[in-house]
Image (cartoon, rainbow, N blue to C red):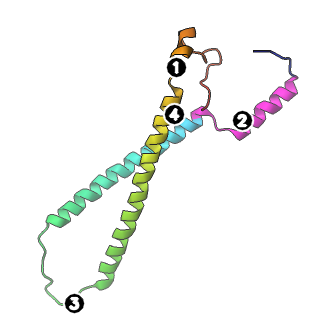
Amino acid sequence: MMRVLVPARLRQAVRTWFDARYISIADHRQDIRDALWEVQTLRREMATLQAEVERLRKAPVRQPAAPKIDTTRLDDAHRLAQETAKALDGVLQNEVLVWQAIDDLRSRLAPTPRESAGSPQGPSSAAGERPCA
């Protein structure tokens, strides 16, 4: 590697440009943590909803005492159930994408045997940070 003297103003301009263009590793990790927290929250809500569905399926069907049925409430319930099913399908697909991204990041950040042979702390120990993939 070759070292070249660079004026401080140019170095600062380049660093500012990089900082404005790329997200930091810490921010990226926090975004992943936030996404995982949302997925776990939605998973708990999904389990609650599934338990409620099972309870309603097992409940005995009662015949209405009066012939008057509130069809607007039934229609609303059916519409909401359909919308919830579509939204939940999207959430589950996004969860799969998040886990695929996490697995991809883990595979990229795993040190190769050639890199870890040079120093006990790996090749990026001098800079103090891992390179952003």
Which image quadrant for residue 50?
bottom left
Cβ–Cβ below 8 Å for labels 1 and 4?
no
Point out the stretch of residues depicted in magenta.
7-26
Mark 1: few, some, or many residues within 10 Å (few <14, many ≥20)? few
Residue occupied by mark 4: 105
Q: Position of residue 9 (x, y in %)?
A: 87, 28
Assess whether residue 22 is covered by the magenta stretch. yes
Reply above or below: 54 against 96.
below
Residue occupied by mark 2: 19
Cβ–Cβ below 8 Å for labels 4 and 2?
no
Q: Disc 4 vs disc 2: which is toward the camera?
A: 4
- Is residue 68 rendered to the left or right of residue 82? left
Q: Is residue 38 visible?
A: no
- Is residue 58 rendered to the left or right of residue 41? left
Mark 2: few, some, or many residues within 10 Å (few <14, many ≥20)? few
Assess whether residue 99 is covered by the magenta stretch. no
Mark 4: few, some, or many residues within 10 Å (few <14, many ≥20)? few
Give the mark nearest the N terminus, 1 or 3. Answer: 3
Q: Secondary structure at mark 2?
A: helix
Residue occupied by mark 3: 68
Q: Main secondary structure of the magenta part?
A: helix
In depth, the one of 97 and 50 nearer the eye is 97
In depth, the one of 25 and 86 nearer the eye is 86
User: Amino acid under label 1?
Assistant: Thr
Reply above or below: 7 against 27.
above
Q: Disc 1 vs disc 4: which is toward the camera?
A: 1
User: Amino acid under label 3?
Assistant: Lys
In depth, the one of 29 and 5 nearer the eye is 5
Q: Position of residue 88 (x, y in %)?
A: 38, 59
Residue occupied by mark 1: 112
